[in-house]
Image (spheres, helix red, strand yellow):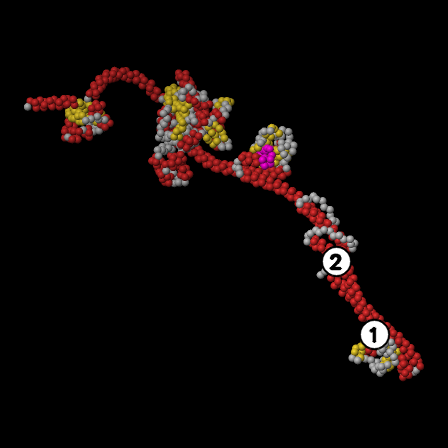
Amino acid sequence: MKLSKQIQIIIIPLMFLLFAITGITLNYISQARAVRNANHQSLVYIDKLIQIANIVENQTGKGLTADDIFELRPYFQYPAFYETDFPFILSANGEYLLHAIKNGQRVPSEIISKMKEFPDKTGSLNYEEFENNKKQHQTICFKYYKPYNAFIGISYNKSEVLKQLGNSEFIIIIFIIIASIIAAFAVNKFIKPIVGGVNQVNGKLKALANGEIPTTLQSSRKDEIGLMTKNLNQLITGLKGTSAFARQIGNNQLNTEYSLLSNNDEIGNALLEMQENLKKAKEEEAKRKEEDDIRKWFNEGLAQFGEILRQNNNDLSLLADNIIQSLVNYLNANQGGIFVYNENDEGKYLELLSSFAYNRKKFVEKVIQLGEGLVGTCAQEKQTIYLKEIPANYISITSGLGEATPTSLLIAPLKLEEDIFGVLEIASFQEFKQHEIEFVEKIGESIASTLHSVKNNIRTRMLLEQSQQQREEMAAQEEEMRQNMEEMQATQEEMERKNNELEIITNTINQSLLSITFNQEGYIVNANSNFQELTGYSKTELEDKKLYDLVAEEQQEHFNSVWKSVLGNQSFTETFRLKGKNDLDIYIMATISPGLDAMGYVEKVLLIGQDITEEKKLEIMTQQQAKEIEKNLKKLRIEQEISATKQKEIQTLLSALDQNCLVSIIEPNGMISYINNMNVNTLGDKKEDIEGKYLHEIDYTAKHRPEEFKRLWNNIQQGNIQHREFSLKVNGKTVWILENFTPVMDEDGNLYKIINIGYDITANKVREQELNEEIELLKKKLK
Amino acid sequence: MQVSDQDLIYFINTLKNVSKYDFSEYSDKSLKRRLQKILEDYNLDLTSLITNMRLDKAFVEKVVKEITVNTTELFRDPPVWHLLRSRILPRFKNNKTINIWHAGCSTGQEVYSMMILLNEMEMLDKAKLFATDLNVDVLDAAKQGIYKYRFNLSYLDNFDKVIKQNPLNFEEYIDVPYEKYFDIDKVKDTITMKKFLTEKPIFRKHDLVTDGNIFFAKFDLILCRNVIIYFNYSLQNKVFELFHSNLYPKGLLLLGMHETILGPWANKFERLGQAYVKK
């Protein structure tokens, strides 16, 4: 609904109502005033009546008497002001004592009781009375009049009073209608331009509501509409500016200036805030990106080194090569070195394990003591050292372009918790950024951890190998020890055996022979009891002596030369004549030999000897006998020579026989004890086959013609020489042998040996055969 | 289980049957202990051992190797080497060649000691060294010439005593560096003989009981130290005979520190300290 209509609908009835209320109120006020006036009039009228009554009373007897009524009646005959408002005198019990019409009638008792309750029993009271079946609003005004003990009053009908006011209600209604029409007209007249302005504004607002930014409105009005328009225009202009600003923000032109529409410019502030935030966000974004890049660089680096560290876990130097090469490249540095911390007996030191593009001019040594130089200090303090100015000649990089000193030097400890494992040294022509330093430190920890585990691995492996090796070694050594033991035991046993043997020998010597040990000077160290008994000297007496002292004078010189020879490592066996105690004459046969030490040098001298005193004495005795025997021996020798000659002859004979004949010697029991070579040559018999055999076992005749052999053998046994002839095949040829068995008798005539001499008569036999064949041939021819 | 005499005979006979080894004239007591040790090491009873020996030729070889005792060291018993240095080797100074046989050379330390000493005496060039042992494993070790270092520190002491010092003159000190003859690697725990030493001797497998002289040569010097202690009296004499017949006249036989020739061969030799000179 249009605003104008609304205003009309609301304002016109409102005006109407307003006017109606005003009219009605005015009407009511006038009525009330009329009533009040009526009351007042009535009371005044009553007072006048009372004055009259007083006068009357005074003239008449006391109380209301008929005179009174008479006298008074004319005053009560007519209505006081209106048509029915007759005055009256009402007794205290409610009976109209004097009333133009209602004389003698009674008022309702409740009214009279109310009346009595009024103060001074004076006042006015409304009541309703039905008259002609119409309800009548009656008002009774009264005053108690004591002399009469009655009330004097007037009762009037309200409508009569109001009737007096005439047609005022109607006039009011007319007024209201006219007023309303005027009001409606006026309102319309007034509202139109306002609504027009509002509508214009509304149109713009609508556009604004749709998000458009309309043109501004022209208005010359100075009222609220004008203000509104002005404000709207301002809004539009402001929005235009804001929108342009927002667009610029949208276009990421964050540095555009923007002036606020007012201090309370929410959008402006919001946009500024937004701009600020966007700026901040942009900066943060840039920062974040940078951080991201760094983080990415960091993480990729960590991953890369993690990979490197994971590989090559067994080869420390290869690992170090990879690490330092990758690190220098990753940092875009120029050179680097990795030092490993070591401890040995001589102290703690850092050892250059690997270097990359290194050309250390001053510190070419690869071992740096802890605390020495920058690297040593870094390791000792476990703190990163970063130098932007490098001591001159500390380090220099050799490249194709020549030598240059790097500008930045980063020395970072490889530490795990607080344990140092080494030092990284990296030099660069560029400065190191904070994150690069942190990266190196971080990597340092990883490297340290890996070094730790690699070292541990290596150590573990080494220990494992070592323990394995030691186990094997132990086993081998145990075996060797056991073998040593075995050898010792075997040696021990061998020595025991030899010792036993030697002991037996020594005992035998001691018991049966003389035994003396001398030192190199010739003093007797030990002489056995045999020698002591022999010489009559006690052991102690002998220990002061040399053998020289005991040797008989004529032999002493000889003894000395023997002794010298013995010291020169020769043994001598000699007979010595010794002088025992009390000039006892003793002969001993003694072997004096040197006792050698392990090197073969003479250490002592030993004498083993035999008491030959008896024999010597016998010898001397027998020597004389021997001389005689010698003579006899000479004779014997001559005889022997003769018999030797004979023997030679016989030998020659025998040898001749041996060469020409088959000789064999047979024992009396038939055993062949000898055959000569002719036997072997002629018959092919082997010596060892024949010798020791019995003739009857191998003889052909004995086998095949036992009777003949028995005869032959018996004849031989009786001492008769026997002959026989036989043939046998030797190597396919028939050989003929003629044998002569010659029994040899001993002195007692018993058979001692049988000598068989055989002749090879094959040639004769062949000849004989040939002759026989020729004879046969001749005989045939003769026939 | 204790090895009884019967057990030992059973073992020896089995060994004789399945191989050419004849241990019947070895020292009973020692052989019993070695057999005992083998049974314990292999955790076998005699019957199983013998069954295995019958079935497995390689096992027989192993057992024989286990039986042999291979104790030796570099310059073992320095006094003996002093004797060699001062009294024995000088005898051959004018020889054109010196034939030396190390019978029972074990892992070769004695051979290397001899070569080192000869070299110090400038006689190595004319020396011919023959080294034999029953056990081919120890011969291989001998050819390698690599020994444990830590366990054998005494080698260096012995070397010092024999090569650097003169027992007859303690003030004399000849500083011969070890590196001249062998390399010491403390990390690997090895003593490694120089190549000029390892390639010089002729190493051969040889059984003193059965093989006689396998070289077509006679010898100026035979070293057979701590071998005959494992033999009984009879076998000892056979070995002495073998040595005697293969020594040049005036040739020397050097036995172990506690070994001596007693019995029939004693008077075929003359003593020269620890050594025996063929008469």
Location of the N terminus of chain A by quadrant is bottom right
Q: Is residue A340 magenta?
A: yes
Q: Which residues are magenta?
A: A327-343
The percent coordinates of residue A633 (x first, y second) are 27, 17
Q: Nearer the viewer, mark 1 or mark 2?
A: 2
Which amino acid is tagged 1? Lys
Picture residue at 55% right of the left edge, 35% below the top: A322
For mark 2, name the chain.
Answer: A
For mark 1, name the chain.
Answer: A
Q: Is residue B3 magenta?
A: no
Residue A443: name its quadrant: top right
The percent coordinates of residue A222 (x first, y second) are 79, 54
Outermost residue toward the right in this view: A59
- Structural distance between the alpha carbons of marks 1 and 2: 48 Å
Query: In the rendered structure, are the residues bearing label 1 and label 2 in contact, judged by CB atoms less than 8 Å apart?
Result: no
| Residue of label 1 | A163
